[in-house]
Structures are given as structure tokens and as C-alpha cells.
Image (cartoon, rainbow, N blue to C red):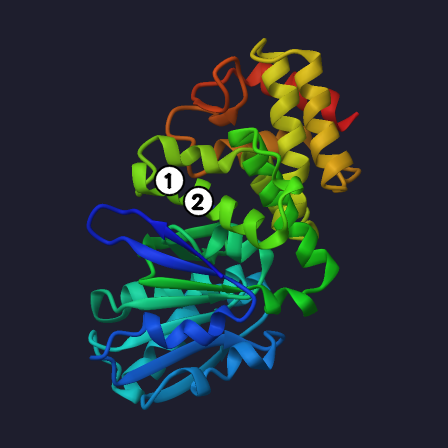
């Protein structure tokens, strides 16, 4: 098992990565905790939903949230926090989010809101959750107007990434995790696929941990973690979530490369490199779905959360991936028309 520390100056926490890491869950629970609210979902393997055997002598209640983006909502937060009230959860107690990225986002936001902040530990059960969603304290829910529009930064006090959970992960969800992993490839140039799985996941967490520690609230550098995400979020919305997040990120990485070339930041060889890594090495689909509307995608990209100053992208360039604000619409459109053709 590996231990990666997220080195936040005043709230550093550990992420335990490896087969059987769940055995160490109790080590992440402070002695003062009397009650634990476990937030989970159907489909999460029973070994990661029924956690009482790993949690000594506490009053535990388990709450299942719905499946699908529609359940990632404020009514779900209301229902969870009403349950917390009924069980008498205090700020000395603990919420555990046990599941994939949706569960840890929702559990994290419920914990952030409950009594203005109650500790949360995540037990991440998907590859995407392990390398991204469960790490770094972004929590939140969707509104009908868009994804993740309401949320809070609320760091977990520890994270378990037990690789046994991946044994039963559906292939599509595994591919979604690989989409996020390919992103880390471009942020660092690390040959992640040459590493065995435990080391590879731990390395992705290390990369993210370093960026989060430097810029917890996304004042700048953290936006690099959104490489490939500007188009990805637009694609998710435009397809009514037919494309899952990691699938959209794989496509978004190629578009980001095409846009980087259009803006003269990278050359043809670097675009080919992106295709080789995402489609070749990670074996991910990079072709956008048919029938997309360029104007709609541009409008959606304008509404992206990091677009504080016009169309904003994380883009590759001579000095690596950087956040570029105020990208001119003509270039975005030209690259998009070329990409969708
Ligand atoms: N998923 C991007 C971030 O945590 O900043």
C-alpha cells in the first residue's frame, strides 16, 4: 500500500492507495467520533458500502443516494442533511462518502454544509474518483442550468483508494478514469502507462496533490487540472450526458490540442502526439459525436466556470500546459469546425 499526502499547509491529509486499503479506514477516524453517516449508492460493491466491520464501536447509519446526474441535486442534499439531523450528527462526528465521483462530490457537499462543516472521509471506488474527484476538496451538485454549479471547497480528512473496488468496475467507468489519467500525462509528460496500477494511481494523486496544495481555491494553477475539460463539459451538456465525463475529457484533450495548434502554441507533431497518447496508448475514443452544433458548444464553453475573462482554456504550449484567458472566438470556432468535420 502507498500513502500520498495532500500537503495543504494547515490541513494536510493522507490518501491510502492499494489492494486492501479499506482495512485502514479506522485509522482515518478520530477517536472523538461517535456517529458516522455513510453516504453511498446502489451499485457500489457491498464490501465498500457496509463499512461497520472497519469502524470500531461507532453508531453508523447508511444513506443511499440516487443514481445518475439528476440525483446530484440540492433535494438530495436536503434529504441527506435531514437524515443527519435525525441521527444527531454533530461537528465532532464524521461523514463518509463511499462510492464513485458523484457520491464523494455529494457527500462532501453535504458534509461541508452540515453545521457549516463536518469532517468527511472518502472511500473512492472508481478509477476516476481515485485519480481526481475524491482528491482536492471540490464538492457540489448540479442545477437544471448546469453541472456542479453549487458547491464548496471542503477537503476530506483522509481518502481510501482500495484497488479491489476496481475489480468489478464496469469497463465504461474504467475508460472514464483513463480519460482523466491521460490528462495527467500531458500535465507532466510522465509515462504513466509504464507503471503498474497502484503506482500509476498514486502518481496521478501526487500530481494532483501538488497542484491543489499550491492553489486550493483555483485562483490560477489549479485550472490546469481542467486540461481538456472546457469542451468536455460542453459536450456532456450538449449530449444530455450521453457522453460520460471521462469520455468527454478524452475528446476534449484532442480539441485542446487542435486549438493550441490553431493559436500557434504547438505544432502538428504535438497534436499527433496527443492523438497517439489518447487514442493509441489509452485506447480511448476521440471522435466527437455526430450532429453537434458549433454555436451551442461555443455558448456552453463561454459559461464554463473558469471563464472569468472571456473564453478560457487550459492549453499546451512551449512552456507546457497553461491557462489562457480571452481566447478569440474565431480561433475557437475554426478549430471546432475543423475538429467536428
Ligand atoms: N477536477 C479538477 C479539480 O479538482 O480541480
Q: Secondary structure at mark 1?
A: helix
Tell me the residue that label 2 is attached to.
206
Q: Is residue 212 above or below residue 137?
A: above
The reply to whether the C-beta atoms of the residues labelled 2 and 1 are less than 8 Å apart is yes
Task: Give SS at disc 2.
Answer: helix
Q: Of all residues shown, which one is farthest toward the top?
A: 264
Q: Residue 72's x, y, as percent? A: 49, 64
Q: Along the line of sight, which residue is nearer the eye, 152 or 160? A: 160
Screen quadrant of the C terminus: top right
Number of other residues with Cα within 10 Å of mark 2, as a class: few under 14, some 14 to 19, many 20 or more: many
Name the spot of residue 16 as percent of width and height, x first: 44, 61
Residue 208, picture quadrant? top left
Q: Quadrant of ligand 1?
A: top left
Q: Is residue 206 above or below residue 1?
A: above
Q: Residue at x 77, y 42 (%)?
A: 283
C-alpha span from label 2 to label 1: 6 Å
Q: Nearer the viewer, residue 257 or 185?
A: 185
- The answer to whether one can see residue 54 in this image is yes
The percent position of residue 109, horizontal first and vertical second, equals 36, 62
Q: Which residue is mark 1?
A: 210
Q: Position of residue 286 (x, y in %)?
A: 74, 36
Q: Residue at x 44, y 19 (%)?
A: 326
Amino acid at each position: 500500500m502507498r500513502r500520498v499526502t495532500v500537503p495543504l499547509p494547515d490541513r494536510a491529509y493522507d490518501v491510502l492507495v492499494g489492494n486492501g486499503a479499506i482495512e485502514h479506514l479506522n485509522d482515518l477516524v478520530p477517536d472523538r467520533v461517535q456517529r458516522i453517516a455513510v453516504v453511498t449508492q446502489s451499485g457500489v460493491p457491498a464490501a465498500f458500502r457496509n463499512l461497520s466491520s472497519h469502524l470500531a464501536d461507532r453508531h453508523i447509519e447508511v444513506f443511499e443516494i440516487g443514481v445518475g446526474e439528476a440525483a446530484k441535486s440540492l433535494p438530495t442534499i436536503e434529504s441527506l442533511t435531514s437524515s443527519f439531523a435525525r441521527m444527531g450528527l454533530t461537528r465532532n462526528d464524521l461523514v463518509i462518502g463511499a462510492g464513485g465521483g458523484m457520491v464523494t462530490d455529494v457527500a462532501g457537499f453535504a458534509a461541508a454544509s452540515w453545521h457549516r462543516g463536518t469532517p468527511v472521509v472518502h472511500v473512492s471506488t472508481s478509477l476516476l474518483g481515485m485519480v481526481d474527484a475524491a482528491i482536492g476538496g471540490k464538492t457540489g451538485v448540479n442545477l437544471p442550468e448546469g453541472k456542479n454549479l453549487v458547491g464548496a471547497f471542503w477537503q476530506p480528512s483522509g481518502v481510501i483508494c482500495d484497488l479491489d473496488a476496481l475489480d468489478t468496475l464496469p469497463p465504461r467507468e474504467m475508460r472514464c478514469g483513463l480519460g482523466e489519467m491521460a490528462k495527467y500525462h500531458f500535465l507532466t509528460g510522465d509515462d504513466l502507462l509504464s507503471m503498474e496500477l497502484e503506482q500509476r494511481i498514486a502518481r496521478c494523486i501526487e500530481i494532483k496533490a501538488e497542484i491543489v496544495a499550491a492553489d486550493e481555491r483555483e485562483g490560477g494553477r489549479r485550472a490546469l487540472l481542467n486540461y481538456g475539460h472546457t469542451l468536455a463539459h460542453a459536450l456532456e451538456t450538449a449530449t444530455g450526458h450521453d457522453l460520460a465525463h471521462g469520455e468527454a475529457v478524452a475528446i476534449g484533450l484532442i480539441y485542446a490540442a487542435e486549438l493550441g495548434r490553431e493559436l500557434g502554441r504547438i505544432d502538428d507533431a504535438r497534436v499527433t502526439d496527443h492523438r497517439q497518447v489518447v487514442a493509441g496508448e489509452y485506447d480511448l475514443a476521440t471522435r466527437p459525436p455526430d450532429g453537434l452544433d458549433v454555436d451551442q458548444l461555443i455558448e456552453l464553453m463561454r459559461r464554463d466556470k473558469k471563464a472569468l475573462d472571456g473564453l478560457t482554456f487550459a492549453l499546451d504550449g512551449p512552456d507546457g500546459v497553461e491557462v489562457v484567458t480571452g481566447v478569440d472566438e474565431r480561433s475557437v470556432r475554426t478549430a471546432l469546425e475543423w475538429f467536428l468535420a
